[in-house]
Amino acid sequence: MTIYTSPYPDVAIRDISITEYVFNGIAPEATVLIDGPTGRTVTGAQFVAGVKALAGGLTARGYAPGGCVALMAPNIPEFCTVFHAVAWAGGTVTTVNPTYTAPELRHQLIDAGAELLVTIAPFLDTAKAAVEGTRVREIILIGPDVGETRGLAAFMGQPLARQAPVDLDDHVVCLPYSSGTTGLPKGVMLTHRNLSVNMAQSLALAPLVEREHTVAFLPFFHIYGLQVLMNFYLGSGGTLVTVPRFDLEQFLTLCQQHRTPRMWVVPPVALALAKHPIVDRFDLSALVQVNSAAAPLGAEVADAMGTRLNTAATQGYGMTEASPVTHITPRGKGRAGASGVTIPNTQCRIVDPVTLRDLPTGEDGEIWVKGPQVMKGYLGNPKATAETIVDGWLRTGDIGHFDADGYLFITDRLKELIKVKGFQVAPAELEALLLTHPAIADAAVIGVKDAEAGEVPMAFIVAASAPTLAEVQAFLDPQVSHYKQIKRLEVVDAIPKSASGKILRRLLRDRMAES
Ligand code: AYL
């Protein structure tokens, strides 16, 4: 067995909850959150008081400890308050993509067993349609009451002074959804330990500067925004300027205004920063680093962006199941095309996916990782958990290799997951929906390269009456979020399958690569 460890020493693992960790970084008088569009500010003292009061209210109403709260909101300061209130009260937060349709939301509410749904007024209709038939007892709104539906203010209670007792290694504080290497999205059980240790591991290599501002557009519902932006910044004494949706001009305006030293992006944004003409109109001279993660970033794009902005172009690698970081670029030590080095307290192997033998340095194989940031497992799915975590090793489903200096290069993806602008799309979910179309007898979905989004979903269907792409889109689009929409379609005689009935996606991918 060849084990790659971190070039950096292990970090101490502290016995505190994620919210205690975050509170430790907060100065009461400092501005910790700024609502980007309005400029509204929240001080450290206000944030902590809000978390404790809401935690008290949730406890009094029986939603915590032990209960699951679904949080479906864009990036606004209150997202952070609600998340940490549930954590402080000993509950579980399942974070929901705010672009979800009612059926997508309902699926997650049922699977997670959520009893309370916290959202904002524009999503109330979706929320109401989704909660039917779930365990959700109540919907509450961030903002004022709307009709019968109460606003967050009504839920503030006697402040809960201390962290509700939880087993740091066992209690699930956060339940984001990920499809992992195969199948439908599953609840990723992350403990307080997972989240707080991953902060310590990452910040050891790349600390933030106190009072440093960053513009947080990457969604907090996804583990990148949740940890690297929300928790790392709040916990390091930083300031988050939240924006509810990405708009390049607004983003750059806020970066200029707040003189942000760091940007946290996904590859399509790196591309815009490299190419878009409006970038030249802004003074970004405070910038020292732009970090891209969550999907492959081409070395040319990284180079072009770094040169244009006169800044370090860095990468992080990891996955929801690893809280999420396993590899990052150490401060000041970038390497073209690499996704970083292994972070402390983490081990890595490169394994031949067929023979399960470890491969020599430099050869491509499946990346396996082990460390205290690896999830407890998938909720209610011991089979998927056992397939994904083998003897404590998390099988990432990604293909890559290490160079002689310990830099990781991601070269391919073994798993069926599609990444659209860094968002996860599970082919199995779209295939199941396609099969409900009366004319479609069989279906397979793969990701195909796209200059802007990185990848987009393409469907292969077997259909007697051969519906057009527009017809399939008209059927599918109302049922799924925009980024899951099928962009290409091909009608085929048969879907290639293995003897056991598994779709041979590789054949479809190769076929697209050749065409
Ligand atoms: P999930 N290069 C190529 N592919 C990547 C990279 C990268 N740098 N990072 C993530 N991926 C792909 O759960 C890869 O296929 O988490 C991986 O298995 O939505 C999958 O995305 C995981 O997708 C950070 C900040 C890591 C964020 C993240 C990962 C969040 C994405 C380190 O510093």
Image (cartoon, rainbow, N blue to C red):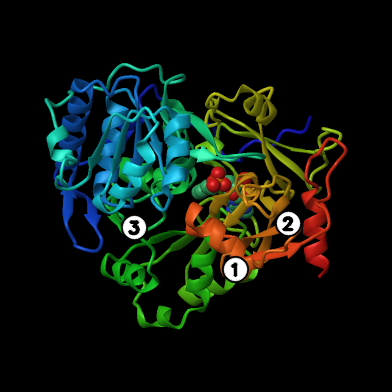
Given the image, on which type of amino acid does mark 1 rest?
Ala
Marks 1 and 3, the one that precedes in the sequence: 3
Quickly name the residue at label 1: 470
Image quarter (top left, top right, bottom left or bottom right) of the C terminus: bottom right
For residue 327, above or below residue 252 = above
Disc number at residue 515? none
Give neighbour class at mark 3: few <14, some 14-19, many 20+ (Cα, 10 Å): many
Q: Which residue is mark 2?
A: 461
Which residue is rendered at x = 84% and y = 35% of the image?
Answer: 500
Residues under numbered marks 1 and 3 in contact, where contact means CB atoms less than 8 Å apart: no
Q: CA distance from mark 2 to mark 1?
A: 14 Å
Q: Which residue is mark 3?
A: 214
Depth check, front residue: 362 or 504? 504
Q: Up-down: is 311 above or below 482?
A: below
Helix, strand, or loop for circle 3? strand
Q: Amino acid at mark 2?
A: Ile
Q: Residues within 10 Å of mark 1 (few under 14, many from 20)?
A: few
